[in-house]
Image (cartoon, rainbow, N blue to C red):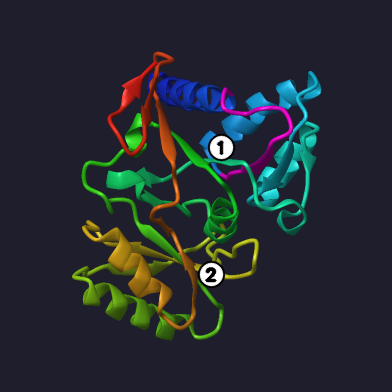
Amino acid sequence: MNSSGDRDHAAAKRAAAAAALGEVEPGMKLGLGTGSTAAAFVDLLGPRVRAGLDVVGVPTSLATAAQASGHGIRLAALDDIAPLDLTIDGADEIGPGLALIKGGGGALLREKIVARASRRMIVIADRSKQAELFGAFPLPVEIVRFAPATTMGWIAEALEGVGITASLRLRADASGRHFTTDEGNLIVDCACGRIDRPAATAAALSAVIGVVEHGLFVGMATEAIIGDGDGSVRRLGRGPASSE
């Protein structure tokens, strides 16, 4: 992507993050997501907190915890303050009915726990994340470290059971070693090509022994805010989209 495209994407993410910041009220208990767009939200939240906004956050990753602490945002353990009022997080792909694919950054387990513990979940993204063909982004599946090849075989069988022939790859880090999540697990990226039945696919993966969690978030997001490079945003909910 050229520098102009990079700027447009950064502006779109910031526009979505700024719109989501308008949903934050004093005294809220917030879930703080992981990824570049969620990071833009935390960067905007920090100055508001330093100016006196009283909120407490639950980070979904060690990286988000470090970023939020650097901004002086007060953090707490989920067990101590659940349920949360609102979670703001990004997505790798947004499909029909606000079905999501998440986990490109490897934080899908904590992200899903925090989202489930929230009264509302707002997804923020740039327009490239809104997919016409849901499932184009490889679906991350978090698995235990024991016998990964065996578990991957079972994952492939589960996907075939819902009509998906996927190519599976164990994720590696920059050094070529197995990518490890904050919880010490591995990630399998499943190139599905297309996911026509997200709920059925989610249920099939959840039933696989060795799978800790998967990156399909179905029925969890209450709203999506899609940013554009010109600073405008669109809001997607259960009804028609609206623009700002």
Horizontal arrangement in the rendering, residue 45 relative to residue 5 (left or right): right
Q: Position of residue 107 (x, y in %)?
A: 56, 55
Q: Which residue is mark 2?
A: 186
Q: Quadrant of residue 184?
A: bottom right
User: Above or below — where is 92 with respect to 6?
Assistant: below
Identify the residue position indicated by label 1 in the image: 38
Q: Residue sitting at 74 percent across and 43 percent down?
A: 66
Residue depicted at x 35% and y 82%: 153
Which secondary structure class fits the magenta region best? Answer: loop
Find the distance from the CA under tag 2 to the CA under tag 1.
Answer: 23 Å
Marks 2 and 1 in Cβ contact (< 8 Å): no
Quadrant where the N terminus is found in the figure: top left
Q: In this orientation, which residue lies closer to the viewer: 38 or 200?
A: 200
What is the span of residues highlighted in magenta in the rendered image? 22-34
Mark 2 secondary-structure assignment: strand
Residue type at mark 2 is Leu
Q: Position of residue 166 (x, y in %)?
A: 26, 68
Q: Nearer the viewer, residue 91 or 184?
A: 91
Q: Amino acid at mark 1?
A: Ala
Q: Is residue 63 left or right of residue 164?
A: right
